[in-house]
Image (spheres, grey):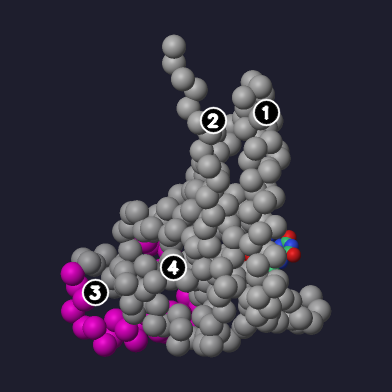
Amino acid sequence: MTETPEPAKPSFRSDVTVELVKHAAGDSDVLFAARVSTAGEQSLEEVTKDPERSKGLINFLMRDRHGSPFEHNSMTFFISAPIFVFREFMRHRVGWSYNEESGRYRELEPVFYVPDASRKLVQQGRPGKYEFVEGTQAQQELTGRVMEDSYRQAYEAYQEMLAAGVAREVARAVLPVGLFSSMYATCNARSLMHFLGLRTQHELAKVPSFPQREIEMVGQQMEEHWARLMPLTHAAFNKNGRVAP
Ligand SMILES: Cc1cc2nc3c(=O)[nH]c(=O)nc-3n(C[C@H](O)[C@H](O)[C@H](O)COP(=O)(O)OP(=O)(O)OC[C@H]3O[C@@H](n4cnc5c(N)ncnc54)[C@H](O)[C@@H]3O)c2cc1C
C-alpha cells in the first residue's frame, strides 16, 4: 500500500530571491548600437578602444534621452517574491517578458511573506504624501502572529479541498497575496531603468517615487546585478537623476 505524503508545513520568509540566470549585457552593447549612426558597422572590440570617449558617449545618450541604444542587451532574472509584488511587477509591460509558475498545473508550496523588524509598519499622512514609520513592538508581534495564523488557516483550507479531489485551479482561490510565487523576468537596460526609476527610492532620483518596500527589495537586487554588468551605463543613470532614457 502506498502512503499519501504529508502535506508540506507552511514556512515564512521576510526576504525575496533575485538571481541573474542569463545575460548578454555590457556597456559595449550600448556603444556598438549608438556608433552605427555615425560610423556604420563596427566591431565590438573597437568600442573599447577609448574608454573615456565611451563613457562620455553613454552619458550623452542618457542625458539627452537617446534611449534605443540601451535596448540591445538582455538580462533574465529568476525572482521569488510574494504575489502582491508580482501584481505590481507585471504592470511593467514594455521591454519585459514574464513566465510565472502555475497554480493550475502544480500544487502551490506553502511559503508566505511575513515582514521582519526592519519593515516600517505604520503609514502616516495622506495618499500621495505619506511616510512610513517604525511600528511598536506590539504592532510587530501582532502582524507576525496574525499573518502566520491566517496563512496556516488558508493553506489548510487549500489542502482540504485538494484532498477531497477539488481541482488546484479552484482550490487556490483561498490562498492570499502573501504567498510566494516565482517567475523568470527578462528585460533590457532601458526597461530595467524605467522600472528602477519607479520602483526604487534613491537620493539621486530627480523624480522621487514612493514604491512599496517589497518590490523595491526586488528592484535593489536587480540593480546590483545590472550595475556589475554595465557599470558605465549604471553610473550615467545615477548621474542623470535616475530617469530612464
Ligand atoms: C508608486 C506607484 C504607485 C502606483 N499605484 C497604482 C495604483 O494605485 N493603481 C494602478 O492601477 N497602478 C498603480 N501603479 C502602476 C502604474 O500606474 C504603472 O502601471 C506602472 O508603474 C508601470 O509603469 P509604465 O506604464 O510606465 O510601464 P510600462 O508598461 O513598462 O510602459 C513603459 C512606457 O511605455 C509607454 N506606454 C506603455 N503602454 C502605453 C500605452 N498603452 N499608451 C501610451 N504609452 C504607453 C509609456 O511611456 C510608459 O511609461 C503604481 C506605480 C507606482 C510606481
Amino acid type, label 2: Tyr
**Nearer-the-camera pick, 189 or 173:** 173
Task: Inspect this view and state whether residue 92 appears.
Answer: no
Dots 3 and 2: beta carbons under 8 Å? Answer: no
Magenta-drawn segment: 45-74
Label 1 or label 3, whichever comes before in sequence order: 3
Badge 4: how crowded within 10 Å, few (<14), some, or many (20+)? some
Asked whether residue 101 is drawn in magenta, I would say no
Residue 47 bears which disc, if any? Answer: 3
Q: Nearer the viewer, mark 1 or mark 3?
A: 1
Q: Are marks 2 and 4 in contact (CB under 8 Å)?
A: no
Write down the residue under mark 2: 105
- Secondary element under disc 4, as helix, strand or loop, is helix
Q: CA distance from mark 1 to mark 3?
A: 60 Å
User: Element at badge 1?
Assistant: helix
- Residue occupying the point 70% across, 71% down: 139
Q: Which residue is mark 1?
A: 161
Q: Earlier in the sequence, mark 4 or mark 3?
A: 3
In the rendered structure, the answer to whether residue 188 lies left or right of residue 131 reads left
Instruction: State the predominant SS element of the stretch in magenta.
Output: helix
In the image, taking residue 28 as reference, residue 68 lies left or right, namely right
The amino acid sitting under disc 4 is: Gln
Q: Is residue 3 above or below residue 245?
A: above
Q: Is mark 1 within 8 Å of ligand 1?
A: no
- The spot of residue 11 in percent (x, y) is 52, 50
- Disc 3 marks which amino acid? Val
* Disc 3 from disc 2: Cα separation: 47 Å
